[in-house]
Amino acid sequence: MANPIQYTYDKRHLNNSEPNKFTEGHLQDGEMLINIGPQHPSTHGVLRLEVITDGEIITEVVPHLGYLHRCFEKHAENMPYNQTIPFVDRMDYLAAMNSEHAFAMGVEQMLGIADKIPARVEYIRVLVSELNRLASHFVAIGTYGLDIGAFTPFLWLMRDREHILRLLEWTCGARMLYNYIWVGGLFYDLPVGFEERTREFCQYLLPKMAEMEKLVIENKIFVERTANVGVLSRDLAINYGVSGPMLRASGLRYDLRRVDKYSVYPELDFDIPVGEGAMGTLGDCWDRTWVRVRECHESIRIIRQCLDRLQGDLKRTRDFDPRALVPKKIRPKKQDLYVRAENPKGELGFYFRADGKSDIPLRCKARSPCFVNLSVLSEISRGSMVADLIAIVGSLDMVLGEVDR
């Protein structure tokens, strides 16, 4: 019998809800307490930084989180598993396909059907997830340019991201919140002509990527704003549970697509880029951007391999039904299960507790990469200039829908 879930109340937790952690009584001579943010349009008033400075040098940073009222975990604990997927989309709305993939894998493992999913379904899942990874990294790189004063890369990358959004909209009719990857299958097979159009897009994108690299990561101003700034050492990243491109930029070749070997990733050939400190110190803001750019190239390699299979031995047939294994009633046996996947921001994990009697989970806990990666902000900002704090926050690539609870 599973242990009951206990919630422990401690009135000291209320101290964390105070508007500021520090008061004037904590300040040393010459220090100043200021609030920064929300300065980025996508933070929606959710992230405020309480900063103590000595002149222009940062001595302490405390992130304060607000609420986007996503309430993902409570939604998941009040409705059947299959009806939760549209709410998964709303956590990291820039990478909804990747999040759907992780959630569906977890429920399929609980039902014992993970090994029965048709190969064509798995390849389509990886195809749309890698397209979404590209779109997410385009937003990360483009808006990062905006953060430090470069406008043109944002326009170029939003132009190319628009092609991806149109492809994904073609599959399911939704622009950003897809509800396309279902437990046991897919909402629908790829539309006729999707493979050909996606292959043309990859051919179009490669020269655009080369232009973007020259404009951004080789740009002298960009290098001077990001190299040797916000350095995250490998040991510190591991100790804080940092994952994804942030961890790999610090030099650790750790990617769940290779470590856990889920879906059809073991059948695909791709590299795991890591930071090298080529322009400054290993694990700085420049390395984090460079790793995301290299991952875009690897995603294109994966997409092309998926297209080869989907147009080859796994091509569409009249009798193929992507919903053949979609269960009408989802009622997993009594168990606890944790599943994780490599999302564009890092490790996205779901912990489920099923009581064996209901099609609604007793507990559904989400481990989101943005929330964990944000925890390291104070460590890598201490001692930096105030102007560099904006560059450091932008390099974290946060989506506050994942940070909110």
Image (cartoon, rainbow, N blue to C red):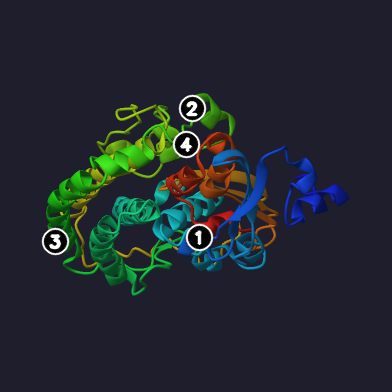
Task: Tell me the amino acid under the disc marked 2.
Answer: Ser
Residue at the spot of label 4? 230
Q: Which mark is residue 233?
A: 2
The residue sitting at 31% across, 70% down in the picture is 169
Q: Amino acid at mark 1?
A: Gln
Q: Earlier in the sequence, mark 1 or mark 4?
A: 1
* Residue at mark 1 to residue at mark 4: CA–CA distance: 19 Å
- Label 4 amino acid? Gly
Residue lying at 39% horizontally and 28% vertically, measured from the top left: 253
> Dividing the picture into quarters, in which one does residue 336 lie?
top right
User: Closer to us: mark 2 or mark 4?
Assistant: 4
Q: Are marks 1 and 3 in contact (CB under 8 Å)?
A: no
On screen, residue 350 versus residue 254, left or right, reads right
- Say which label, 2 or 1, has the lower sequence index: 1
Q: Is residue 137 left or right of residue 391?
A: left
Distance from the alpha carbon under mark 2 to that under mark 4: 10 Å
Front residue of this view, candidates 139 and 71: 139
Q: Position of residue 197 (x, y in %)?
A: 15, 63
Write the residue at 26% across / 58% down.
Answer: 157
Q: Residue furthest top?
A: 235
Which residue is denoted by mark 3 in the rendering? Answer: 196
Of labels 3 and 4, earlier in sequence is: 3
Quadrant location of the C terminus? Answer: bottom right
Q: Position of residue 181 (x, y in %)?
A: 41, 61
- Asked which secondary structure carries label 3, the reply is helix
The local secondary structure at tag 2 comes to: loop
> How many residues crowd around disc 4 within 10 Å: few (fewer than 14), some, or many (20 or more)?
many
Q: Which residue is mark 1?
A: 39
Q: Nearer the viewer, residue 192 or 119?
A: 192
Give the mark nearer the N terminus: 1 vs 3: 1
What amino acid is at disc 3? Answer: Glu
